[in-house]
Image (tube, rainbow, N blue to C red):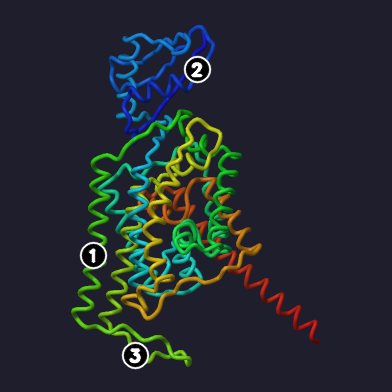
Amino acid sequence: MATTLFRITAPRYRGSPISLLSDLIVQDRSKLQRRVYHVPSHGLHSNVHQAHILLYPRSPKMKITTSAIAEMTTAVSSVAVGASAGGYTLLSFTPATAVLGGLLLGIATAGKLLTTGRVLGISGAVKGLVAGDLASWRFAFLMGMALGSVALMAALPGAFEALPQTLPVWRTVLAGLFVGVGSSMGNGCTSGHGICGSARLSPRSFAYTATFMASGMLMATLTGSAAALKIAPLPAALAMPTVAEAQLAAVVAAGGIAAFAALAAVQRFMGEATPMPPTPQGGSSQQQLPQSRRFELASELLAGCIFALGLGLSGMSRPSKVVGFLTLGVPSWDPSLPFVMAGAVAVAMVAYQGVMRFQMMPKPLFCPTFQIPTSSVIDTKLLAGGVIFGAGWGLAGICPGPALVAALMGDPRVLGYIACMVGGMLLQGRLETLVARLGSKDVQWMKT
């Protein structure tokens, strides 16, 4: 008789115990005469120490006893609620929740574009600070993300997860370094290229996104990222949004749109003039009024807050959810992530195409011009950046935005990831400057 032991931790498992039971059965069909599954509850209920199911392989379906189902249901319920320490994380396939989270990401992206004219890129905002560009809008946006993280912790604490001890420090350190270098080389990450670039229908962003997706899948699969994050080797059961998730999506979406609209209405009512484009001499033909500046910063704050909430609702703030998609060839593969991208791009595309193709607005509401990238160059630097960024993403399942959101948890590995990401951006910038200087010297030497 063969015995298989499963230890399952499922704080966010939203399927029924019966569906989990079905997964266990389907997962391990074999020709064995008898198989016993043990699911220890470790003191969650003193009268339930373990449950077992006897499976008899009778074609075309397996047969199990009613008492076994009852025992299994009781044990799995206790494990799903109690989440024993050191157990595995059970993934759920959540396409509807992913789309709802993606819609919030799209609203933040579109709102930022229409009000400030800027692309919503997390790595770009951080990289600017690293490079010494201390523009106030960067601080406002990142502060908004911090506020969104606090709100997320209060409204949906399940959006955060504690990293297991099996995830070594070297993984997060290397992941942060790779993500910092790669996003700096490629001038973007999952938000700037994956959402905004795709919404612009940019071939450059398509190339970068496809590259980092492929690289992330390859790295996660080859290095066993799912095992490092202790993802249970069980199929991801379909789960619909909980009431709390649906309410959060509705409130944030409606509230976010209303808040952006209110800022525009108040600005128009007060008759504040937006600044004119800079003159060729670098000056400004009209001073930006302080009140307009406040509207701009309020929009940045709002966009950052909504974006953080969208990351949490969509599942992007949970590394196991990301790695569940990036790791191929495993029973736990979770295809929820593409639904996040689809929801975000669908909303953002309306704004970007409206501005770029249909010219529905000559300029953003609170700034003088739209600052939309126009480069279409697909070069070695871009693709190499995508490979490096994807490798870091696949190692730990964390990219810049979710890292900033998860920093609220205070996990030293996440904080170390952020520090190494910043270090990677700084390193890439210094190397690029050094190469440029050496190239300039070579040119001068050849001229002499």
Quarter-wise, where is residue 353 in the image?
Answer: bottom left
Q: Residue 184 is drawn in which quadrant?
A: bottom right
Percent coordinates x, y for residue 286 in the rendering = 34, 90
Residue ID for mark 3:
286
Which residue is the site of mark 2? 29
Q: CA distance from mark 2 to mark 3?
A: 74 Å
First of labels 2, 3 by sequence position: 2
Give the amino acid at mark 1.
Ala
Counting residues from the start of the chain, the first of labels 2 and 1 encountered is 2
Query: Upstream in the sequence, badge 3 or badge 1?
Result: 1
Q: Is residue 307 above or below residue 23?
A: below
For this view, does 218 lie left or right of residue 88?
right
- Left/right of residue 206 with respect to residue 86 in the rendered view: right
- Check whether the beta carbons of the residues at disc 2 and disc 1 lie within 8 A of each other: no
**Residue 47: image tag:** none
Which residue is drawn at the image coordinates 59% and 65% (left, top)? 428
Q: Could you tell me residue 101's position as x and y percent?
A: 34, 50
Q: Viewer-proximal residue, 315 or 93? A: 93
Within 10 Å of the Cα at label 3, are there few (<14), some (14-19), or many (20+) other Cα atoms?
few
Identify residue for label 1: 259
The image position of residue 24, as x and y in percent, is 43, 22
Q: Residue at x 37, y 72 (%)?
A: 137
Q: For marks 2 and 3, give the one nearer the viewer.
A: 2
Distance in Å between CA atoms under marks 3 and 1? 27 Å
The residue lying toward the viewer, choosing from 140 and 206, is 206
